[in-house]
Image (cartoon, rainbow, N blue to C red):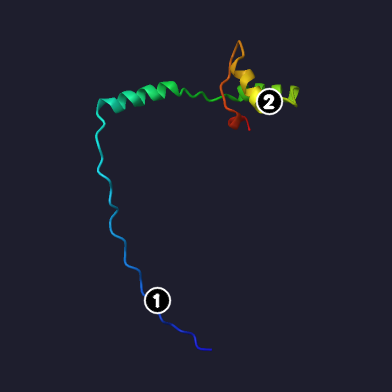
């Protein structure tokens, strides 16, 4: 058997990336960004909050996750906001 030492031709190098021209949104973009950040308030749960959630899960083993999330959102004191995906 003869082993060939021929090299394959190299590929041409790609050219620079063609960027789309940027547009300035002005003051409206800042206002909408600020308004959007206020509406999507995010709160991280502490370890104590999660321990409370898991104690509730242990006490109610047959309850669906969606119902558990709803329970903690509507709790009269110390309401916790998280999604079913976070709980899962």
Residue 25 occupies which quadrant of the picture? top left
According to the image, label 2 marks what residue?
54
Residue in the image at 41% along x and 21% along y = 38
Q: Position of residue 2 (x, y in %)?
A: 50, 88
According to the image, label 1 marks what residue?
8
Dot 1 surroundings within 10 Å: few (below 14), some, or many (20 or more)?
Answer: few
Secondary element at image label 2: helix
Q: Nearer the viewer, mark 2 or mark 1?
A: 1
Vertically, is 1 above or below 63? Answer: below
Question: Which of 44/61 is in front?
Answer: 61
Residue in the image at 66% along x and 27% along y = 65
Side (left or right) of 88 relative to 6: right
Vertically, is 16 above or below 59? Answer: below
Residue at the top extreme of this rendering: 76
Residue 7 occupies which quadrant of the picture? bottom left
Secondary element at image label 1: loop
Q: Position of residue 74 (x, y in %)?
A: 60, 15
Marks 2 and 1, how far apart at CA: 61 Å
Q: Which mark is residue 17?
A: none
Side (left or right) of 13 relative to 43: left
Question: Which of 28/60 is in front?
Answer: 28
Residue in the image at 58% along x and 19% along y = 80
Lower position in the chain sequence, tag 2 or tag 1? 1
Q: Position of residue 56 (x, y in %)?
A: 70, 21
Side (left or right) of 86 relative to 2: right
Residue 61 occupies which quadrant of the picture? top right
> Could you tell me which quadrant the C terminus lies in?
top right
Dot 2 surroundings within 10 Å: few (below 14), some, or many (20 or more)?
Answer: few
């Amino acid at each position: 058997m003869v082993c060939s030492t021929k090299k394959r031709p190299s590929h041409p190098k790609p050219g620079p990336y063609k960027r789309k021209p940027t547009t300035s949104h002005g003051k409206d973009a800042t206002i909408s960004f600020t308004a959007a950040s206020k509406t999507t308030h995010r709160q991280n749960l502490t370890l104590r909050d999660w321990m409370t959630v898991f104690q509730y899960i242990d006490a109610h083993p047959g309850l669906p996750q969606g119902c558990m999330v709803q329970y903690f959102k509507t709790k009269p004191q110390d309401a916790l906001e998280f999604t079913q995906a976070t709980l899962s």
